[in-house]
Amino acid sequence: MGGGTEAFPDLGQHCQHPDCHQLDFLPFKCDGCRNVFCLDHRSYKKHEWPKSDHNSRKVVVCENCEMSIETTGRDGEDEKVMLERHEKSGSCDPKKKNKPTCPVRRCKEILTFSNTNTCKICRVKVCLKHRFPVDHACKQARVSSGPWNGKFMAALASRNAGDCADRMMKMFLK
C-alpha cells in the first residue's frame, strides 16, 4: 500500500496491522518483524508479534531481602529455582529489608532514590525536608561558615520583628 496524499504521495505509510491500515505520517518500524505500524500498534503486544518478549528485561524480587534478580536471558529456568539459588548464595540478607530512614530526630521519612539528599558539609543522608544544614542540626555547620562568614545569619538572628520596618520608615521620612 502506498502512503501519503495527492500533494505528497511519498509522505507517511499505512499501518500494517490487519485491522487498522491507518495512514500515519510518523510510522514506527518494528525491529522484530520489520513491519510498519501506527502509534496504537507499535508495541510488540499490540501487533501480536509472537516473540514479543525477546528484548524485554524481567526481574524477580526476593521477598526476604527485597533484592531484584534479573531473569533476562535465562530461558527455561524457573523463577522459584532462581530465588532458591539466591537465598543459598549468601547475598540474601533479611536485614537489608529494613529501609533507611532520615536520621533527624522525630522524622520517620523513608529514604529513597528520589527523596534523599547528602549534606555537603557533614555527608549525612537526610530527606528533602531536612536538606539544609540548619534543618538537620549539622554538627559542622556553624554561623561562622559559609560565603558571608555568618554576617547574614548573625544579622538575621539579631534583628527584631519591627526593626526592619522602623528603619525603612526613618529612611523615607528623611
Image (tube, rainbow, N blue to C red):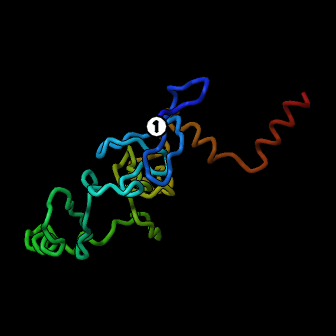
Indicate left or right for 162 with 12 as reference: right
Question: Which sits in the foreground, 43 or 138?
Answer: 43
Crowd class of label 1 (few under 14; some 14 to 19; many from 20; radius 10 Å): few
Location of residue 123 in the rendering, given as x and y in whole percent from the top left corner: 34, 49
Q: What residue sits 46% from the left and 37% below the top?
A: 1
The residue at the far front in this view is 1
Q: Residue 95: image x %, image y %?
A: 22, 73
The residue at the point 38 percent across, 40 percent down is 29
Left or right for 42, reference 171: left
Seen in the picture, residue 79 relative to 171 is either above or below; the reply is below
* Closer to the camera in the image, 8 or 90: 8
Q: Tell me which amino acid carries mark 1.
A: Met
- Percent across and percent down for residue 58 are 26, 60
Residue toward you, 55 or 79:
55
Question: Which residue sits furthest right?
Answer: 173
SS category of the residue bearing label 1: loop
Residue 64: image quadrant is bottom left
Residue at left offset 90%, top offset 27%: 174
Front-lying residue, 140 or 102: 102
Marker count (numbered): 1
Q: Identify residue for label 1.
A: 1
Q: Is residue 133 left or right of residue 170?
A: left
Residue drawn 9% across the image and 69% down it: 90
